[in-house]
Structure formats: C-alpha cells, structure tokens
Image: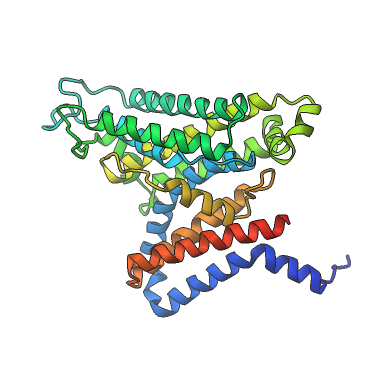
Amino acid sequence: MKIKELTAKDIKNIMMDKALIIVLVFMIIGIIIIEPSFLQIRVLTDILTQSAVKMICALGLMFALLLGGTDLSGGRQVGLAAVMVASLSQMADYSNKFWPGLPELPIIIPVIMTLALVAVIGAVNGFMIAKLKMAPFIATFGMSTIVYGINCLYFAKKPNNSQPIGGIREDLTVLSSFKVFGQISFLVVIAVIAIVGVWFLLNKTVFGKNIYIVGGNPEAAKVSGINVSKVIITVFIIESMFVGLAGILEVARTGGANSAYGNAYEFDAISSCVVGGVSLSGGVGKVSGVIIGVLIFTFISYGLAYIGVNSNWQLIVKGLIICSAVALDMRKNS
C-alpha cells in the first residue's frame, strides 16, 4: 500500500487547523519543564476531576454551536441548577435549612425537578430562535439576565437571605467523593458516559445527522424535508439539560452552592469547543475535538496556577487563547 506524501500545502493546512493546539501543548511542556512535579498521578486525577463538569458543560454548548448559534445563558443555567438542587438536597437536621421543615426527599426528585426547570429554559431559548427568528446571541443573552435574576430572587428568599447553601446530603456528594480504582472521581465516569452518549447521538442517529445538516445549511435542510424548528428547539432543550447536569455535579463536587456558581462557564465551554475544532459557523465539529479542547484548557489553567502565575495573568492568557481560537476558526472558514 502506497503512503501518500505530504505536500507543502498539506502541511500548511494541518498547521493552520491544529496551530492553537500545538501552541498549547508546547505551553504544557513548558510548565512541566519549569515544575517537573506537575507530572504526578495526583495532579492528573485533579485535572480529570476538574475537567469532568467542564466537559459536560462543553458537550452541551457543542450542540448549540453545531447549529451555528450559541447559548450565553449556559453559565447562569449552571448556577440556577446548582442553587435549585442544593436547596432541595440538604440534610434534615442541618441548622440553616433553605426550606425549613422539608423532609429528605429521594435524591432523584431534586435532580429531576432541576433538569425539568432548565429544560423549560432551553425550550424557551429554542422557541425564540426557531419561531421568533431572534439571533441566538441576543435571545440567549436576554435569557441569561432573566435566569440570573430569578436565581438571585430565589437565593435571597427568607430564611436563607442569600447565604451560601450547605449541608448537602451524602447521597449527592458521593458522586464526587466516590473513587474508582481508589483515585479517579466518579464524576470522571459520568463525563465518560456523557461523551459516549453524545458521540452516539451525533454519529449514529438520524437526529444527529440532521443537526449537522441544519447547522451547515438550514435552507437546504428545509428543502430536504427536515423540520428545522423542531431540531433547533430540541437541541436547545438537550443543551440546557447538559448544563443543568453540570450544575448538579458542581454541587456534588463542592458540597454547596450560591448564586455565583456557573458564572462565565459558557465562555470556557465555547472556547474549549472552538479550540477543539467546533466551528462557530455551524455544521462542523467532533466530540473528540471537544475532549481535547477541555483537557488542554484545564491543563493550562491548572498548570499556570501550579507554577504560581498570578491569577490576573491567567485571565489574560485565557483571553488570548479565546481570541486566537476564534480568529483561526474565521480564517479556516474563509
């Protein structure tokens, strides 16, 4: 079998397509050179645990991006989901209960109620975009403000009065505290299950194919008989349920919640997707790319903190990565 030789043009295209990933990998190598102790099992397991919630959030935002849209309310939905599930999952004898007198409900009930709430938000987002023809940026930005306002009002109700919610029951926090093989958080297992589920949906189902078609060319999708509005609304419901799940798992990981949870999570998720090759123009993107994007971002953030880089410089680096990712995406599409 003859192996095709790479031409200068092929190499240029590969470098253009993977340029940011290559730079970020070199940054990780630089961190390891500066602090060799970065290469240890504990650091790796910490990074995987931190990546788990971000991975689920990014997988959700991937759906919106594949349609050529976005969801700027994703982070605020994470916060609302966190506060909602935490307020309903406190121990019965906790001294500062959000709902005094509320008995301990089976943990599945707060989880279902929370996912149902964010699913409604996703449906409204999808309706505004599909039926009212609003630009996703504007529709979801407005929804972000609404969701944050609702969350703050709920969080500030008496007797809680905007106090951080604690006393989370063990049957929720066990999702984070339980270790597989004694070292890997069960959150990582949940993230892997989510990855497999999204990959199957996008690659092995008719609905998944329709998402790519609608994102690539909505007019052609209509002509081919696809119900574009139905696809858009369903996608935003799925996306909201993913970010809602991320909020639930964030409570399991931290053992508490407040109204600030999830702030700017959508930007990290979108950045990870774009770094991983998901196009902002829609119709292009792979689950494997999202995995790479999330892991690289987490490695960089954790690594910079590990070697003692000032948090303000970390924000600058993250901003440069985001701008570079978007610029490269626009260049490739042009």
Give the residue drawn at x 47%, y 38%: 141
- Residue 202 image point, x, y percent: 65, 38
Residue at figure coordinates x 33%, y 26% from the top left: 110
88 up-or-down from 255: above or below: above
**Residue 292 figure quarter:** bottom right
Q: Quadrant of the N terminus?
A: bottom right
In the rendered structure, the answer to whether residue 301 lies left or right of residue 177 reads right
Looking at the image, residue 98 sits to the left or right of residue 265; the answer is left
Answer left or right for 210 relative to 168: right
Tell me the quadrant of the picture where the C terminus can be found.
Answer: bottom right
- Residue 249 location, x and y as percent? 37, 40
Q: Residue at x 54, y 60 (%)?
A: 323
Instruction: Give percent across and percent down for residue 59.
Output: 53, 43
Question: Looking at the image, is 80 positioned above or below residue 28?
Answer: above
Front position in the image: 53 or 159: 159
Its colouring scheme is rainbow
In the rendered image, the residue lying farthest to the right is 2
Residue at the far left: name it: 95
- Of residues 190 and 114, which is closer to you in this image? 114
The quadrant holding residue 67 is top right
Q: Number of callouts in the render?
A: 0
Q: Position of residue 97 (x, y in %)?
A: 16, 29
Residue at point 78% right, 24% down?
A: 225
Whether residue 286 is situated above or below residue 9 in the rendered picture: above
Viewer-proximal residue among 12 and 218:
218
